[in-house]
């Protein structure tokens, strides 16, 4: 399957928000996971000198949304809207690269349940999330 | 109370994330609400041409965090960390100004429960949120 | 509208879970709110001598589900499934009657966003909730 | 460790809610997971003939709360309060035994992050949950 999917791989600047925040979407064939990573800089900081919780949610939402899309077509092009999302903030992130990974846990054709994890480079779990995603009718 | 609090009012560029995203914190004396607003531009867009869900969470998280801070001191300087947060995405936002408002619903000295609403200029409800915030021990 | 809806009012024992837990659904014409109440007894207690959090979720889920149903038809007969639900536990409940109230905040024909509040007899807020409900296709 | 912990094992009727609903807590030494199961009967049903969502939340809350307790002492006697909890309802449950499993994902001494899964006898995932638990100061 991988050889037919050159579009999989690293995606940058697909949306305005992606360019602004600077995260990179990393889609790998075969495992159905949505991933995106961000190299932290001072522009991502909150009042506590850590990665802003809203940006954490942003990364997790992206990874989960791409997981939803990848479950519908192998290139992740099918669009899903986030219906609801819960994030738990386990530990602060201060520097280096953080990676969000999303995976579908259940659902049907139109509504999908997805969960996500945000980890730092050492594999430490920084945040977890769950969300409901709905397929956009086209 | 208001005359003694010149710091209340519009806050810009307090954090890296705030400068990057461009939202403005709007603290008004007396009502205990945390508010922030964002004038939408293409840099805030998602795959669907609407305001990115992660940025929606970011705005709501800020408004809720400031509501927590305002409950602890009248200038909102007390720092709180977001423990968990749930956002429901009711309707897409495409242009103009969106405003997030947060208010404390309960809790004690260290743990606070807060909810939030995001509205557009016409007062249409775009998203709601609830969160748990924990006071940072200093 | 009220005179044509004799079924509105107090509903008991509609489901197995309702009979087991003993809560009463209280549908009033006109305001679109779903309500249910429970008179607390020792059979509802948790390890801390308070109302069990699961039962709190149960009451809120019922009130929110009925709010969803009432938005689709005036008697609240349309069935909705709970897709996801978040509950925040603000304060313990120990005795007397607690009442859960749910109201629709947004959504369309198939997916609805609903929030809920649980209060004691003095009107003290004990818990809040938000949920996503999906109409059952018949 | 196991031989010194005769109290681990099956726990019935510890609380009023447990007796009423009829679930069994199943604590096994060593893995730190909280578990409880319920053999479904008509008394657990909702309007759709499936297991009531509130009871699903109840089982998950119990399993997650015991996971929190087991992280604080090997017998799971330390008490934790549920601060907030999100449940996602992936699939209906209609008969047989359902088992909820909870595990701690992060946190410190007073606040813990826990997730949970509810499965049927065939191992099918019915619901997932995440929650924040706070240690009761004694």
Image: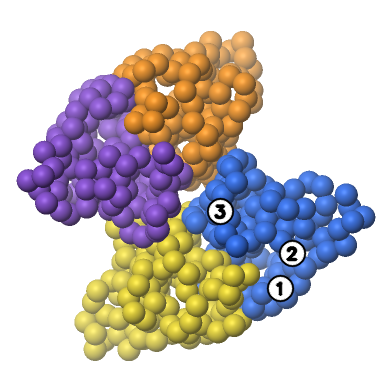
Chain colours: A orange, B purple, C yellow, D blue
Secondary structure at badge 3 equals: strand
What residue lies at 7% left-to-right and 46% top-to-bottom?
B3
Determine if residue C62 is in view: yes
Asked whether C94 or A135 is in front, the reply is C94
**Residue B38 tag number:** none
Residue with the most extreme right position: D3
Q: Chain of mark 1?
A: D
Q: Is residue D65 left or right of residue A45?
A: right
Tag 3 near tag 2, CB within 8 Å? no
Q: Residue at x 58, y 13 (%)?
A: A4
Label 3, label 2: how many angstroms apart (C-alpha)? 18 Å
Q: Position of residue D41 (x, y in %)?
A: 69, 74
Label 3 vs label 2, nearer the camera: 3
Q: Which is nearer the N-term, disc 2 or disc 1?
A: 1
Circles 2, 1 touching at the beta carbon (< 8 Å): yes
State the residue at coordinates (69%, 49%): D71
Other-residue count near label 1 (Cα within 10 Å), few / some / many at <14 / 14–19 / ≥20: few
Q: CA distance from mark 2 to mark 1?
A: 9 Å
Q: Is tag 1's residue or tag 3's residue first in the polypeptide sequence?
A: 1
Quadrant in the picture for the N terminus of chain A:
top right
Q: CA distance from mark 1 to mark 3?
A: 20 Å
Q: Residue at x 32, y 76 (%)?
A: C123
Ranked by sequence position, the earlier of labels 3 and 2 is 2
Place of residue A138 in the rendered image (x, y in percent of width and height, measured from the top left): 36, 35
| Residue that mark 2 sits on | D25
Near mark 2 (Cα within 10 A), the count class, few <14, some 14-19 or many ≥20, is: many
Q: Nearer the viewer, mark 2 or mark 1?
A: 1
Task: Name the residue tied to disc 3.
Answer: D133
**Chain for disc number 2:** D
Q: Is residue B130 above or below residue B93?
A: below
In the rendered image, which residue does mark 1 sit on? Answer: D14
């Amino acid at each position: 399957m991988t050889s037919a999917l050159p579009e999989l791989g690293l995606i940058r600047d697909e949306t305005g928000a992606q360019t602004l925040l600077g995260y990179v979407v990393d889609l790998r064939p075969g495992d159905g996971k949505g991933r995106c990573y961000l190299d932290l800089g001072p522009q991502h900081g909150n009042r506590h000198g850590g990665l802003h919780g809203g940006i954490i949610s942003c990364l997790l939402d992206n990874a989960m949304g791409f997981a939803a899309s990848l479950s519908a077509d192998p290139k992740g092009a099918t669009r899903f809207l986030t219906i609801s999302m819960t994030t738990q903030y386990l530990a602060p992130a201060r520097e280096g690269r953080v990676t969000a990974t999303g995976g579908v846990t259940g659902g049907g054709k139109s509504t999908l349940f997805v969960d996500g994890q945000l980890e730092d480079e050492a594999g430490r779990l920084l945040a977890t999330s769950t969300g409901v995603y709905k397929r956009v009718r086209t």
